[in-house]
Image: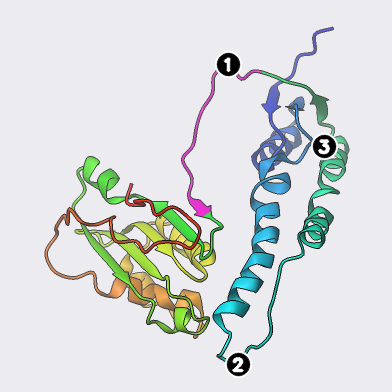
Amino acid sequence: MIQNYDLVVIGSGTAAQVASSRVRAAGWSVAVIDHLPFGGTCALRGCDSTKVLISGVDAVDMARRMRGRGITGEAAISWPDLIAFKRTFTDPVPANHERRYAERGIDVFHGTARFTAPSTIEVPSVAFTLPPIASVGLGEAQALATGLRFRVNRQKVSNWYTARRVAETVYGYKTLVEGDSGRILGAHLVGPHADVVINLFALAIRNGLTAEQIKQTIFAYPTGASDIGYMLHRLKGELYRDPGIGHHLPKLRGVENRDNAD
């Protein structure tokens, strides 16, 4: 029996939940199809579960970095316990998602479907490495391809308080600002709290804020956010293209060093 819907969503992640709920509230008939447990990659296999696992590793890593700086003893990972803790987050997700769809009058189907007219959206990104690395907006090559005139600032700043406080040797950034308007075009970070600070850059880019507006904002100190003004502070001088930009990110522990300029 063929059922017709105003909207059929393939996949059951966060985007599916938001889109299906909004159009259902507008009176559309909606179905959601997924061949995997409901909840999507982020809630079950990606963002959330990865962040829980990296929290355990981060605790051990910090204890080792702080040894001799007020911390003694040996920390270690208990993998079965860490996995059990992770499952307290992921196990309830599928049933909760299906219940919410049912409450909103959205039909759910378990199976494989094909989307005949795909669309893709490039969104901001974070990798939960140690330390985290994050990027939003344009890289240098992308900015050049658009014909924009812009300034680039990049620096290794492991001597800043944010890194020194946790004995982290990897901390660096690159920011791109449009030459004429001062709009922030892109930010690329590696180091403590990069996964949090990148959201402030994303907000600035989305709303067309300028570097000067961000520098005039007072952020709580000392926090990762309080470094943002300094990341934009040195954007002075002539517009230029440095062919070496993008090849100066420090090596991440346990992660292949990659050019994050593009």
Query: Which residue appears at 75% of the width and 33% of the height?
Result: 24
- Mark closest to the chain's N terminus, 1 or 2: 2
**Mark 2 neighbour class, 10 Å CA radius: few under 14, some 14 to 19, many 20 or more:** few
Magenta stretch holds residue 55: no
What's under tag 1, amino acid-wise?
Thr
Q: Residue at x 80, y 8 (%)?
A: 2
Image position, residue 86 (x, y; %)? 77, 56
Q: Nearer the viewer, mark 1 or mark 2?
A: 2
Q: Could you say which is closer to the camera, residue 10 or residue 30?
A: 10
Task: Locate residue 260, reporting x and y percent.
Answer: 36, 52
Q: Which residue is mark 3?
A: 101
In the rendered structure, find residue 116 and report the number of the disc placed on it.
1
Query: For this view, does 79 lie left or right of residue 160?
Result: right
Q: Give the foreground label among 1 and 3.
A: 1
Q: Circle 1 sits in a helix, a strand or a loop, which is it?
A: loop
Horizontally, residue 109 falls left or right of residue 224, namely right
Look at label 2 and name its amino acid: Gly
Q: Residue furthest left?
A: 238
Quadrant into which the N terminus falls:
top right
Q: Looking at the picture, tell me which residue is in the foreground, 62 or 242.
A: 62
Residue receiving disc 2: 70
Q: Which residues are magenta?
A: 114-126
In terms of sequence position, does the residue under pointer 2 or pointer 3 come before the other? Answer: 2
| SS label for mark 2 | loop
Between the residue at mark 2 and the residue at mark 3, the CA separation in whole angstroms equals 50 Å
Viewer-nearest of discs 2 and 3: 2
Mark 3 residue type: Tyr
